[in-house]
Image: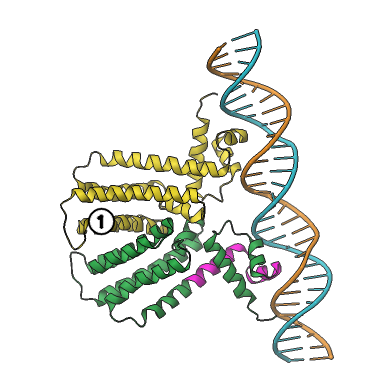
Chain colours: A yellow, B green, C orange, D cyan
DNA sequence: TTCAAAATAGACAAGTCTGTCTACCAACTT
DNA sequence: AAGTTGGTAGACAGACTTGTCTATTTTGAA
């Protein structure tokens, strides 16, 4: 059974459970059960539950931006790309059962782990930077400067998904998109 | 020691720990230790840990709006009150060590408890309604109608605090306020 | 002063948690 | 063909979890 994707199965299962149920209520026992692997295999690939958590964050971060790149690629123009960011988050909100942002969720649980907080911040800063670059490409002018406009969009996104997570719906991010359409 | 505030001490301690550390990592043992009360006293006032959680949400909700009322009372004019909402959240963000919204935090942990979700939603809806009433009192007109403007402010608030929680800072809600000042 | 309510300390049950360890087996490489 | 690697199954330690229960003491009011 060499190379049979044991490590992937562990990480996939853990990722699903960490997001769905929460990190602390998900036990090693449940992970090995649902991933259908041996206990020693898990500890062979991930020395501790914390390592598994960090691997979850890293892989989620990576696939998040990979997927976003593919999502934005066919879309023309910075304004349309900015609006598509909302569609992307709305799509994910639906796909993952309306529980909000993965990174927001984990921050609420892993309260004081610096390794976790650093990854969360890096993830959000990368998104913010991407938004700012797109805003800079628009020839937009208003009472807000480019950075403020980028922050507005960023906060509308984050606020929409956060509220969507609390309401278990996609209403808030959809409203956020409508506002962005009016503002841009 | 009758009426010595045992119940209050339990709830205060639990509230602090639930927010600070998280609900699931806070054990009954730690609560009774730090509240300096007997185990049976806790179970006398709160039949289960879940009851304690709901009491925490209810009391937090109540004091949140009481405090907000007092905070807004001396402030004149709907526009100024709306901006003061940001100051209120920023003040709380600082006071509670930058961990973001209490209700957002608990939603990330108590994933599927309907009693919890209902309280969170009620809390946020009340805030949203308050914002809309204040917006209605302004004679503001723009590309956004009143409801959209209220939603914008609401999402800026929630986004600012959510990001502030993830960054462990008050930068984001402060930026959110500046944007609100420009928009209003 | 009597008496019930409410607090205390602490043992206990039954279960869960993470992480380690042994023993064994299958597969791939040299 | 021998040996290394990565997988499996499952026992185990030690700590922690929530909730119950007994027995005792303090408190405030009648």
Question: B182 or B26, which lies in front?
Answer: B182
Residue B47 appears in the figure: no
- Measured as percent of width and height from the top left, residue B144 is found at 21, 65
Does residue B44 belong to the magenta stretch? yes
Q: Tag 1: Cα neighbours inside 10 Å, few (<14), some, or many (≥20)?
A: some
Residue A116 appears in the figure: yes
The quadrant in which the C terminus of chain B is found is bottom left
Chain ID at mark 1: A
**Helix, strand or loop under label 1:** helix
- Measured as percent of width and height from the top left, residue B138 is found at 24, 76
- Measured as percent of width and height from the top left, residue B132 is found at 30, 71
The answer to whether residue A111 is above or below residue C4 is above
Question: A14 or A174, which lies in front?
Answer: A14
Q: Is B62 left or right of A42, judged from the image as shown?
A: left
- Measured as percent of width and height from the top left, residue A160 is found at 34, 57
Instruction: Assign the magenta stretch its main secondary structure.
Output: helix
Which stretch did the figure color magenta? B38-60
Q: Is D26 left or right of A21, judged from the image as shown?
A: right
For the point 69% across and 81% down, the residue is: B2
The answer to whether residue A47 is above or below residue B168 is above
Q: Is A138 left or right of B154, judged from the image as shown?
A: left
Does residue A117 belong to the magenta stretch? no
Q: Quadrant of residue B88?
A: bottom left
For the point 33% across and 81% down, the residue is: B75
The quadrant in which the N terminus of chain B is found is bottom right
Where does label 1 land, which residue? A147
Tally of numbered tags:
1
For the point 53% across and 49% down, the residue is: A23
């Amino acid at each position: 059974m060499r190379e049979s994707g044991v490590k992937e199965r562990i990480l996939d299962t853990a990722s699903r459970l960490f997001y769905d149920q929460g990190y602390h209520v998900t036990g090693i026992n449940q992970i090995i059960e649902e991933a259908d692997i041996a206990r020693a295999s898990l500890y062979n690939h991930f020395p501790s539950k914390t390592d598994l958590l960090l691997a979850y964050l890293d892989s989620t971060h990576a696939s998040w931006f990979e997927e976003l790149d593919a999502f934005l690629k066919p879309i023309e123009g910075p304004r349309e790309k900015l609006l598509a960011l909302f569609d992307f988050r709305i799509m994910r909100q639906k796909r993952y059962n309306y529980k909000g942002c993965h990174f927001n969720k984990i921050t609420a649980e892993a309260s004081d782990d610096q390794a976790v907080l650093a990854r969360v911040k890096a993830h959000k800063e990368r998104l913010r930077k991407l938004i700012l670059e797109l805003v800079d490409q628009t020839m937009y002018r208003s009472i807000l400067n480019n950075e403020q406009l980028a922050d507005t969009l960023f906060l509308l996104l984050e606020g929409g998904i956060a509220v969507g997570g609390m309401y278990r719906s996609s209403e808030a991010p959809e409203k956020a998109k409508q506002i962005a359409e009016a503002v841009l």
